[in-house]
Image (cartoon, grey):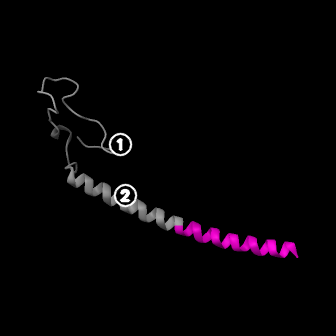
Amino acid sequence: MGSIFSAIGGAIMAVISAIANVLMAIVGGITAVLVAIWNFLLDIICCRCGRTRGGRMGTGRGAGTGTATTTTRGGRFGRRNRRY
């Protein structure tokens, strides 16, 4: 009798696990789309779309003396493929 209840419990757990996996996949897909849209909007707002290599000629915070702090190449959200 215990094996019957164990089999029924296992089947119920398998169904619940499958539903949870489907929901996790849906949420992951929606999150990926939202993050892609957010990154696209940040690219537009921050004027990073279509920028060529010679387009960024800033002096940063210094007086333009040619020091290491004159151009900032630090990370905004850790992007790898930036166009300067």
Residue sitting at 55 percent across and 69 percent down?
22
Q: Is residue 60 magenta?
A: no
Find disc 2 in the rendering and name its residue: 35
Question: Which residue is depicted at the point 62% across and 69% down?
Answer: 18
Residue range highlighted in magenta:
1-23
Residue 42 vertical position relative to residue 58 in the rendered view, above or below: below
Q: Tell me how far mark 2 sits from mark 1, CA to CA.
A: 14 Å
Q: Position of residue 68 (x, y in %)?
A: 23, 25
Where residue 25 sits in the image (x, y, percent)?
Answer: 51, 65
Q: Quadrant of the N terminus?
A: bottom right
Q: Is residue 3 covered in magenta?
A: yes
Q: Amino acid at mark 1?
A: Gly
Q: Secondary structure beneath disc 1? A: loop
Q: Circle 1 sits on which residue? A: 78
57 or 14: which is nearer to us?
14
Neighbourhood count class around disc 1 (C-alpha, 10 Å): few under 14, some 14–19, many 20 upward? few
Circles 2 and 1, Cβ within 8 Å, touching? The answer is no
Please report the residue visible at 11 percent of the width from the left and 27 percent of the height from the top.
63
Q: Residues within 10 Å of mark 2 (few under 14, many from 20)?
A: few
Residue 84 position in % (x across, y down): 22, 40
